[in-house]
Image (cartoon, grey):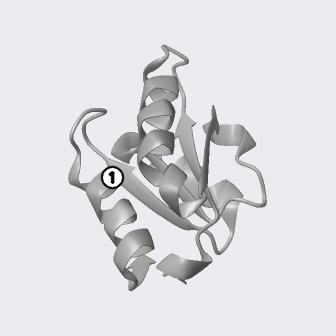
Amino acid sequence: MSSIEGSAIKKVVIACDAGMGSSVMVASQLAKRLKPYKVAVTHTPVNEIPADADVVLCQTTLLARARKTTGETVVLGFQSFLGDPVFDQVEAVIRDGGSLAD
């Protein structure tokens, strides 16, 4: 189990598989939400997650694949591209403090 303090989060990566554009939309929306906290948000294929990612978000069906390539990085899954509680959770930990764990 990996964990990270909200104050240490500087880069969030949205990992995808299908390349249908949904991850780009999620990354754009989350980037707007996290901009006040100076947290970068990018998207990448699940097999190409960069080593400097602090937190990786992906669909729950991709969790195992994402965790294989990330080592100790926190990897969290989401069910829905719109309105999933994990996006609120990440923002709250960055804004209010606390930690994230997978």
Residue 3, visible in the rendered structure: no
Which picture quadrant has residue 82? top left
Query: Which residue is pictured at 68% across the width and 59% down the height?
Result: 53
Which picture quadrant has residue 83? top left
Q: Secondary structure at mark 1?
A: helix
Using residue 65 as the reference point, say whether residue 80 is left or right of it: left
Q: Depth check: give the residue in front, 16 or 62.
A: 16
Query: Which residue is pictured at 50% across the width and 36% down the height?
Result: 27
Q: 10 above or below 31?
A: below
Using residue 52 as the reference point, say whether residue 21 is left or right of it: left
Query: Which residue is pictured at 33% across the width and 52% down the height?
Result: 87
Residue 12, visible in the rendered structure: yes
The outermost residue toward the front is: 36
Using residue 73 as the reference point, say whether residue 52 is left or right of it: right
Instruction: Give percent across and percent down for residue 63.
Output: 46, 52
Judging by the rendered image, the residue that carries numbered circle 1 is: 87
The quarter in which the C terminus is drawn is bottom left
Mark 1, residues whose alpha carbon is within 10 Å: few (<14), some, or many (≥20)?
some
Instruction: Give percent across and percent down for residue 34.
Output: 47, 53
Q: 6 above or below 78?
A: below
Give the amino acid type for the residue marked by disc 1 in the picture: Phe
Q: How many marks?
A: 1
